[in-house]
Image: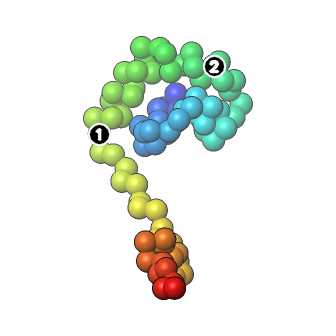
Amino acid sequence: MRMLMATFEVNDRGICNINQVVVEQVIPHWTLESVKGARKGQRYRSLLMDLSSGPRRIRASPPLPSGPPEPTLEKAVTPAY
């Protein structure tokens, strides 16, 4: 389980509340306190270092919005009186 959790953490850096996300998405049968304790251990930190030094997954860019662009206030024309 630690390997699964560490792989998730290495591939998804920058997630807020990583402990909660791990419980919800990776190992739901663990408690939040179990995940916190596991991540504090030296064995887990060593595993993270090993995984971090290897090839990393490249995240895809978010999809571009479809449809016409939204009008902006900068392009609005004020009527002449």
Q: Across the whole image, how many numbered discs are drawn on residues?
A: 2
- Front residue of 38 and 65: 65
Report which quarter residue 18 is drawn in.
top right
Q: Amino acid at mark 2?
A: Ser
Q: Position of residue 31 (x, y in %)?
A: 69, 24
- Front residue of 53 and 68: 68
Residue at 46% over, 42% down = 12
* SS under mark 2: helix
Q: Find disc 1 in the rendering and name its residue.
A: 54
Q: Position of residue 36 (x, y in %)?
A: 57, 20
* Label 1 – label 2 distance at C-alpha: 26 Å
- Front residue of 7 and 18: 18
Around disc 2, counting alpha carbons within 10 Å, would you say few (fewer than 14), some (14 to 19), or many (20 or more)? few
**In this view, 74 is above or below 55:** below
Q: Can you see residue 19?
A: yes
Return the residue found at the far bottom.
80
Is label 1 in contact with label 2 (beta carbons under 8 Å)?
no
Report the side of 73 relative to 30 (left or right).
Answer: left
Residue at 46% over, 62% down = 62
Q: Which mark is residue 16?
A: none
Residue at 50% over, 38% down = 15
Q: Can you see residue 7?
A: no
- Front residue of 74 and 68: 74
* SS under mark 1: loop
Q: Amino acid at mark 1?
A: Gly
Q: Which mark is residue 34?
A: 2
Q: Position of residue 80 (x, y in %)?
A: 48, 85
Residue at 33% over, 46% down = 56
* Nearer-N-terminus badge (1/2): 2
**In this view, 25 is above or below 33:** below
Q: Position of residue 28 (x, y in %)?
A: 69, 34
Q: Closer to the camera: disc 1 or disc 2?
A: 2
